[in-house]
Amino acid sequence: MTWTRVTLMERIELAPGLARFRLSGHRPEFKPGQFVQLALDLNGERVGRPYSLCSAPGADLETLIVRVQGGALTPALFELAQGAPLWVHTAASGNFTLDRVRDAPSLWLLSTGTGIAPFMSMVREGSFNRFAKVVFVHGVRKLAHLAYRREIEERGFVHLPVVSREQCEGLLHGRIPDHLDNGALEKRAGAALDGNAQVLLCGNPAMITQVYGQLIDRGLTKNRPRRPGNITFEAYW
Ligand SMILES: Cc1cc2nc3c(=O)[nH]c(=O)nc-3n(C[C@H](O)[C@H](O)[C@H](O)COP(=O)(O)OP(=O)(O)OC[C@H]3O[C@@H](n4cnc5c(N)ncnc54)[C@H](O)[C@@H]3O)c2cc1C
Ligand SMILES: NC(=O)c1ccc[n+]([C@@H]2O[C@H](COP(=O)([O-])OP(=O)(O)OC[C@H]3O[C@@H](n4cnc5c(N)ncnc54)[C@H](OP(=O)(O)O)[C@@H]3O)[C@@H](O)[C@H]2O)c1
């Protein structure tokens, strides 16, 4: 794997420690849902981590990154000035794409935090045209963390925020698994999350484990290369 230099064009802060990073200088071929490694040279060592791409293939790269306190890379990423250089792997990777996701009456995209990132690349590429209904469920701590909310709504998708650490008028409060259990998500979406649906999960590994269990209990199955099912997921740590 080789590294190539890119430039930080812009960092758009959505909340303290949460930002969109726009990068210029290299546009690898990729499929929506894939990630690239980004790296900085810190104390004589190249420190790289995977980041899902939010941009459409062919556009300048965009990622959505949260600063992890005490992390090796993210605190330094949030110190970079506009125009600063960083490294990106020349090629993208990952299997969290729509390639093996079958047609379905409804596509449920369940994410926490920056786990919404891969879905934005799919949105921007127009990958969802084959699904009659697309439901975004985004679990975040605070209202300000609802990245891309307007863009999703403007494109006509159902957007269901679940906010855990603030009470927000009109929005679901708590965590995604609670509102799956109590039926609030399906009620607001006007669609069933059952064996006819396709579901993509991304973000916090504990959320994925919990929701995966709930979906298995509802009769959905994991989407495997040789045994198609309904559930496809990617954990961030
Ligand atoms: C396929 C893939 C795609 C990813 N895409 C994104 C993305 O689009 N945006 C993004 O912000 N991150 C993404 N991540 C996470 C990212 O790769 C790093 O792990 C994260 O940025 C922390 O890096 P760090 O060097 O600052 O912390 P590290 O020094 O690597 O980790 C410090 C600790 O924080 C934990 N940790 C890592 N990420 C988080 C998190 N988000 N919240 C809480 N704890 C965490 C680690 O398990 C570790 O215990 C992705 C991870 C994977 C595997
Ligand atoms: N988000 C930011 O803007 C921000 C800024 C600076 C630093 N950070 C740091 O970045 C890291 C990641 O924070 P984050 O807010 O992006 O992600 P996160 O901690 O994964 O939280 C995102 C959402 O997922 C929920 N969640 C956690 N466990 C869950 C589970 N088992 N099932 C369902 N939902 C679950 C959280 O609910 P709960 O609130 O109930 O846990 C929250 O609503 C943290 O270390 C944080 O301190 C975040």
Image (cartoon, grey):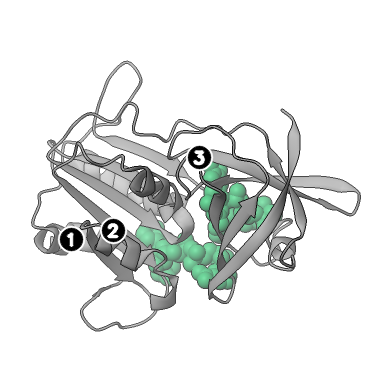
SS class of the residue under badge 1? helix
Q: For this rendering, which residue is in front, 54 or 76?
A: 54
Q: How crowded is mark 1: few (under 14 residues within 10 Å), some or many (20 or more)?
A: many
Identity, as a three-letter code, of the amino acid under mark 3: Gly
Residue 161 vertical placement versus 122 (above, below): below
Q: Position of residue 80 (x, y in %)?
A: 74, 65
As drawn, the residue found furthest toward the right would be: 44
User: Marks 3 and 1, how far apart in space?
Assistant: 34 Å
Q: Where is residue 105 in the image (x, y as percent from the top left)?
A: 12, 39
Q: Mark 1 points at which residue?
A: 185
For residue 137, the mark is: 2
Q: Which of marks 3 and 1 is nearer the N terminus?
A: 3
Asked if one can make out residue 25 in the rendered structure from this viewpoint, the answer is yes
Mark 3 or mark 1, whichever is nearer to me: 3
Identity, as a three-letter code, of the amino acid under mark 1: Leu
Mark 2 and mark 1 in contact (Cβ < 8 Å)? yes
Identity, as a three-letter code, of the amino acid under mark 2: Val
Q: Residue at x 22, y 56 (%)?
A: 157
User: Marks 1 and 2, how far apart in space?
Assistant: 8 Å
Q: Position of residue 160 (x, y in %)?
A: 24, 64
For residue 75, the mark is: none
Q: Where is residue 196 in the image (x, y as percent from the top left)?
A: 12, 36
Q: For this rendering, which residue is in front, 104 or 28?
A: 28
Where, quadrant-wise, is the N terminus in this rendering?
A: top right
As drawn, the residue found furthest toward the top would be: 226
Q: Earlier in the sequence, mark 2 or mark 3?
A: 3
Residue 187 vertical placement versus 89 (above, below): below
Q: In this view, does 111 lie to the left or right of 179?
A: right
Instruction: Classify residue 97 by image quadrant.
Output: top left
For residue 58, the mark is: 3
Q: In this view, does 183 lie to the left or right of 83?
A: left
Asked if one can make out residue 67 in the rendered structure from this viewpoint, the answer is no
